[in-house]
Image (cartoon, rainbow, N blue to C red):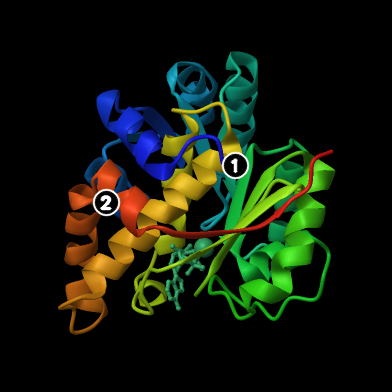
Amino acid sequence: MTRTPGYLLAALRAEPPLVQCITNYVAMNIAANVLLAAGASPAMVSDADEAEEFARIAGALTVNIGTLSEPFVEGMRAAIAGAEAAGRPWVLDPVACQATAYRRRISAELLALHPTIIRGNASEILALAGEVSRGRGVDGRDSVAVAEDGARLLARKHSSVVAVTGAVDFVTDGTRAVRLEGGSPLMPMNTAMGCSLTCLCGAYAAVTGDPFDAAVGALAHFAVAGSLAHEGSTGPGSFAPRFLDALHAATPERLDAEASIHTIEEVRA
Ligand SMILES: Nc1ncnc2c1ncn2[C@@H]1O[C@H](COP(=O)(O)OP(=O)(O)O)[C@@H](O)[C@H]1O
Ligand SMILES: Cc1ncsc1CCOP(=O)(O)O
Ligand SMILES: [Mg+2]
């Protein structure tokens, strides 16, 4: 890593990035609150009539297929064109991409556009990599360890950074790779956690030209805040507001001190 999560968080708070989020109906409100608590500026802008124009002024774009329909897809195509034209990073969240033919087709189309970062649970990353996935709906049903090789493959094939999340997270750009520990087992019991994290990956990508560092920074922020919020939580309900508070309370110093990031390979091409 060239920039630590704490360094990136300080940059993000110094100049909150505008992040265009095309996300699903479940996640819209939750992800907007997550970005605001973390220190970024979210805008849920998805209509094809304005998505391209907006992507040109946003610091980053995030695209999520959670509640897929043609109007969303048209907005995604337009926004990605705008982000590409403006040289802005964009992040793909392939929610339940294994579930139906429609999702398989659209996720393949989006993948072919070379997302800067792909963030998904292990079942989604396995499916995107063309490997056997135990996923049914939106929840991950495979271990991250099983998806690591598929993630490396995807990263190399599409020149993307791939972030696979679960109990232990894994990030790779095809040559570099890290695992991150932390978070809370209450996180998968809160809907739209992963979707919100995808939006935060966009926020971190907007403040650095290195998408690998950006993905690690966003995941570290979630892991540290998740561990902090877990303390004193009595279940998923009390965890949710504590998590927002913890995202906000996380300082650059705390992130660098408490993030548990293990470098597992560094292959120089
Ligand atoms: N068992 C767990 N223990 C700790 N953190 C977890 C656990 N499961 C998921 N997380 C965290 O929850 C966030 C969302 O990840 P995940 O549940 O894999 O995404 P999705 O909601 O897309 O399935 C990530 O920050 C991840 O590290
Ligand atoms: C429940 C649900 N249904 C369609 S999208 C969605 C939210 C999924 O959120 P996440 O992938 O972050 O768990
Ligand atoms: Mg998800």
- Percent across and percent down for residue 221 are 36, 52
Question: Which secondary structure, mark 2?
Answer: helix
Q: Classify the position of the N terminus by image quarter.
A: top right
- Percent across and percent down for residue 48 are 54, 29
The residue closer to the viewer here, 254 or 154, is 254
Residue shown at 78%/63% (left/top)? 150
Name which residue type carries label 2.
Arg
Residue 19 at least partly seen: yes
Name which residue type carries label 1.
Phe
Location of residue 17 with respect to 136 vertically, above or below: above
Local crowd at mark 1 within 10 Å, few (<14), some, or many (≥20)?
Answer: many
- Percent across and percent down for residue 33 are 25, 48
Q: Which mark is residue 212?
A: 1
Q: Is residue 152 left or right of residue 72?
A: right
Residue shown at 40%/32% (left/top)? 19
Q: Which mark is residue 254?
A: 2
Location of residue 44 with respect to 250 vertically, above or below: above
Tell me which numbered mark, 1 or 2, is placed earlier along the sequence.
1
